[in-house]
Image: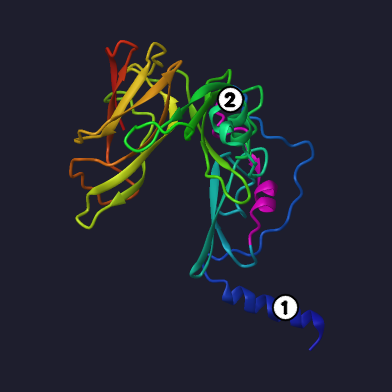
């Protein structure tokens, strides 16, 4: 058998083994010359600028004969802050991607988590540099059910001149240092939301008991508080939220209309939920510095 025929047979066998949903190997590509991801821009930053597929392939290499979702054969670029699921038969792995630099870890001193300079350095480890284009709004120190633990930073917030809000979540210190993850949201006025303004965060890390009720949960993030007209309430001072139907609520600071939220909560009410993709409803009140109700929100 000559070498050409051998290659053809190997390719045919590989094609037979590659069942539907199994993609051919993704070609390696070079990062476009001069490419940079800049989220400091007006307009729809969640779709533009896009991350070239070459960067995704280099950071998240697709193994031979594995499939990807989204399909990297069909897309040329992806929006920042996304993820890819790679799969092959019963195996799979998840790859987060999205900012101008690769995620990293940094060594920090205990006091760094309570200073702007320290949080900028920690949050930059997410891959989105917290440079001078991001203005620091503040951070939230909190423990279980809203009780403060000095020195523990759970959420930090930044904003740029175009109203893009960064919610940063510093990680725990480990042998390699401390990392962080970030989420972006719109911090400017939006169109009115039918049925009232949404709360800026939803519950995460839900713990469910044997009877199907919520045992504990977390609230984390930074986002705008708005009235029913969609306008940011810049005169707000705090946001008080909790699961609908529960007596346990937590209070979070609001800076320039942006709530900075984190709480680990144990509810008192028996709140049932079945679908992890549809968590229980969060509802709450937007208050001014005197505790006067300015608006309500509901996720």
State whether residue 55 is above or below residue 253.
below
Q: Would residue 181 appear left or right of 282 to someone viewing this image?
A: right
Residue 194: where, in percent of width, then height? 29, 25
**In the rendered view, would you say 118 is above or below 27?**
above
Whether residue 290 sits left or right of residue 96 in the image: it is left
- Residue 114 image offset from top left, x and y in percent: 53, 28
Residue 206 appears in the figure: yes
- Residue 8: which disc? 1
State the extent of the magenta-drawn residues as a range. Answer: 43-62
- Mark 2: give few (<14), some (14-19) or many (20+) Cα within 10 Å: some
Residue 169 picture location, percent across and down: 50, 37
How far across and down, in percent of the image, does residue 6 sit? 75, 82
Q: Nearer the viewer, residue 224 or 4?
A: 224
Q: Quadrant of residue 243?
A: top left
51 is within the stretch colored magenta:
yes
Q: Which residue is drawn at the image coordinates 22% and 49% (left, top)?
A: 213
Which residue shows up at 18% across the image and 45% down it? 270
Residue pushed farthest bottom?
1
Residue 79 is one of the magenta-drawn residues:
no
Q: Which mark is residue 210?
A: none
**Secondary structure state at the residue bearing disc 2:** helix
Mark 2 highlights which residue?
Answer: 116
């Amino acid at each position: 058998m000559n070498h050409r025929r051998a290659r053809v047979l190997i390719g045919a066998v590989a094609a037979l083994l590659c069942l539907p949903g199994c993609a051919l190997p993704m070609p390696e590509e070079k990062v476009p010359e001069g490419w940079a991801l800049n989220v400091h821009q007006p307009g729809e930053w969640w779709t533009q600028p896009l991350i070239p597929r070459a960067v995704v392939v280099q950071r998240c290499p697709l193994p031979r004969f594995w499939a990807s979702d989204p399909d990297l054969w069909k897309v040329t670029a992806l929006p920042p802050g996304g993820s890819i699921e790679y799969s092959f038969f019963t195996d799979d792995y998840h790859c987060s991607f999205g900012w101008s630099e690769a995620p990293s870890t940094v060594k920090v001193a205990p006091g760094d988590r309570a200073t702007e300079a320290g949080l900028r350095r920690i949050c930059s480890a997410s891959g989105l540099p917290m440079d001078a284009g991001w203005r620091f709004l503040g951070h939230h120190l909190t423990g279980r059910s809203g009780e403060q633990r000095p020195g523990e930073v759970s959420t930090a917030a930044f904003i740029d001149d175009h109203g893009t809000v960064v919610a940063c979540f510093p990680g725990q210190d480990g042998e390699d240092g401390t990392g962080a993850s970030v989420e972006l949201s719109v911090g400017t006025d939006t169109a009115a939301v039918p049925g009232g303004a949404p709360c800026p965060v939803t519950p995460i890390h839900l713990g469910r008991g044997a009877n199907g009720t919520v045992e504990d949960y977390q609230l984390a993030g930074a986002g705008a508080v708005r009235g029913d007209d969609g306008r940011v309430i810049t005169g707000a001072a705090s946001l008080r939220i909790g699961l609908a139907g529960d007596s346990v609520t937590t209070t979070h600071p609001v800076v320039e209309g942006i709530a900075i939220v984190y709480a680990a909560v144990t509810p008192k009410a028996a709140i049932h939920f079945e679908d992890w993709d549809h968590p229980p409803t969060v509802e709450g009140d937007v208050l001014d510095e005197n505790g006067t109700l300015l608006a309500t929100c509901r996720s």
